[in-house]
Amino acid sequence: KIQCMLRQHWARQVRRQLEKDRHELFIKHTNAAIEIQRIARGRQGRNRVKAIKQAKIIEAEKKRLSAQRIQSRLRGNQSRAAIRAIQYAKSVIYRQHQRTLKQVKTQLENLVNSLPSQDLSITQTNELEMATKQAEKAMEYDDQEIIRIQCLWRGRKGRFTHHLLLKAKHEREALEYKCAVRIQSRVRGRQGRQVVEKIKQSQFFYETTLAYKRAIRAKEEKQKWVERLDMEKFKIQVEKEKALEHKLKITRKEDELLRLELNVAAQKKLIEEAHLEKEKATAQWKEATDNFGYVYYQNLQTGETSWSVPVDILRHRELLKSEKTSSTEEDISSEEDWEELYNPNNGQMYLHNRKTGETKWSSEPPVAAVDPPKEVKHKEKTETNSIPEPVKEVSVENLKCGLCQKQNAVKECLHCTTTKFYCTSCFNKEHKAVTHHEHDFKILNHDGSRECAMCQHCSEASVKATYYCENCNLSKRYMCQSCYTSSHSTAETIPHKFIHFSAGASLCSQCKGEKLVAQRICYDCSDKFCIDCFSTLHAKGKKKDHNVKDLNVLKVDLGENESYCIQCDVQAAVRVCNLCGDNFCIKCYDDVHSKGRKAEHTYILCKDAATAGDWIEIYDGNRKSNLYYNLATKETLSEKPSVLLLGLERHREMIADALREKKKREVERESEVVALREKVRALEEENELERRHREQQAILEDNPDVLETKPKKKWWKTKAQMEKEKKQREDKVVLSLMITKQRKEKLHQEAMQIGSAGYANTILNSVTPPKQDEQ
């Protein structure tokens, strides 16, 4: 038992020693393995770094060689693709032009013209291909739609025609006899009423126009007669005063011879009294102006009035001139003292003396025998409501040519001012110029009167015709307004075809038998023709190329509240001149008011002037003022409407409105210019900031190592302060690395050297579109 315990003790000691030795050996092996691994790993890392450096050098060389090859292939592919795209786009444009009648530039053509002829980018080529595909799709869509529309239209037209044929076939026989009489009666009645109403309206407007013309003519004749009568009275009065003055001078001379030696003092006293009487007579005359701006003289003692300067005032002025200076040069007023002024009330020019204050007309009318004004006789209205007889045109027997004074005049030019009457040869010579080709003329008879259509129904042969009925008897086709109204008021004559032309229109120079109204003028033939004769004579040969113009002689049909133009008497009046007071069509108004003072005239529309009768004036007792009420629109105004104003007042108001509108437009235009300038300035600032930002980003991209080292954050600084410092550091780096002009040239020279890295980067940048363009 003791041995067993001893052996166990020895065995435990041996086991502990063996475990201790084994543990020490394990620690040695572990330390040795760690040392071996460290040495092996260091060698492998150094070998791997060398291999990576060598691989990078090889890869950089491969990239450079590959870039050169890619550049050449890319340029070739891009050029060929661009040429193919342009050629195909031009073929599509050619097909588009063939499909249209008008050569209008399409969107694809505008794109092709906007692109450069060489060095197209990939984006531009893709855009051109997309536009070409869209154009082809549009043409295909148009073809499909055209075919579909034609198919639908033909089918609908065929079905509708078939339906109409069937319907007409079934209903014609059933309704023809039953409805024919009823339809005819209603249609004839309605047409008859419309024609009668139209004829009554045209007759009323024609009568009104003639009455207005007669009133204007009578007013002018009366005014001329009154002026001649006043001038004649003034002349007789002046002659009487001169005769009395002459007798008085003779008497005074005789008295002076008898009393000269007896009483010199009494003679001086008489002379002083005569001077006082002259001054008194001169003081009794007063200068004044009438409502139209004309200057006249009034005697405050006798109430006598005179248009010209009285004799007493003239003597007084001559006496003042003789007393002021004795030299003859100062007695006679020079032409420089007279100035020509304009009277805005009547539109006439008059002369004014700056020194004496004397006024006179620029051209004094000649004093002739005074004739009483002619009474305007109105034709009595009959049961057929005939219009007043038109004024006869004066005819001159054996009227000679104004140029040669040998041959009888056969043509009257309507545009020439110096000479109006010509024979055939003189007319052709005078109107060879291009400026005279547009002149119109009228044919004259052998006695000098105009060859125009006369009424064949009136008893008087001097009444001009305005209607030509094609269905009436051959010798009764030309009629005046009253004869046509009376003879075509029945249901049988209302459907007759007629031509309504202006009074005094020339007849055809080629018609045989009954002459028709001339509607065309040939400036090469110097004659007027109707439509049939012109077509016959100018159908072939050299006459086919003659200079021809249509004559404005056919009257238009008037509507409700319309009248003919006072100038041409053919077109419907559209404008009313505020100062002239007459109605004009647009063309005649522009011709009459094209130059001179009349170019400043204003106008209103005839349809606005026709509403003047709708306004009535009502006195308001509460406001103690007049109100204006419109019967048609139920509108009430406190101010007088413009249509009720006088022409001169309306003219001044429209001129003031035009000036206000002009100033308003100028102010708006100036404000728009200022706004555009501000926009341009803002855009320039944005472009400048963007340019600077791009330069900074380019500099930072070229030198990324500058910003890689981040500074250590200080614990006492906030994030905002760190961001601010970073921004300042970036700005300093950009300013330090700003490229100068010399450095740019140096970099450019390096980039142009073939085989260098800068050259490859430059070529790639030129081929590859920038990111901003792609966006």
Image (cartoon, rainbow, N blue to C red):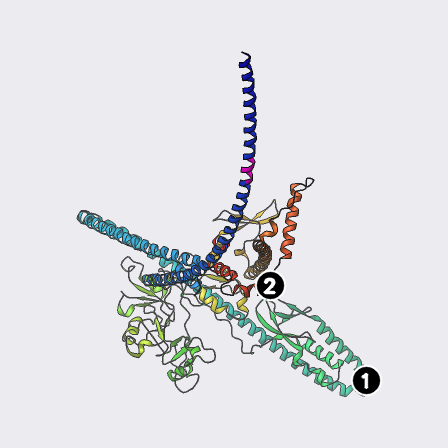
Residue 308 visible (yes or no)? no
Q: Residue 200: where, in percent of width, then height?
A: 37, 58
Left or right of residue 625: residue 761:
left
Callout in the foreground (2, 1): 2
Q: Does the magenta stretch include residue 540?
A: no
Magenta region: 30-35
* Above or below for 153 versus 590: above
For the residue labelled by badge 2, is the local secondary structure a helix, a strand or a loop? helix
Q: Residue 424: where, in percent of width, then height?
A: 37, 82
Categorize mark 2 by other alpha carbons within 10 Å: few (<14), some (14-19), many (20+).
Answer: few
* Amino acid type, residue under disc 2 in the picture: Arg
Left or right of residue 666: residue 522:
left
Residue 541 visible (yes or no)? yes
Q: Does the magenta stretch include residue 32?
A: yes
Residue beneath label 2, please?
743
Instruction: Return the mark for residue 264.
Output: 1
Q: Residue 373: where, in percent of width, then height?
A: 50, 71
For the residue labelled by badge 1, is the local secondary structure a helix, a strand or a loop? helix
- For the point 40% across and 75% down, the residue is 440
Instruction: Return the mark for residue 277.
Output: none
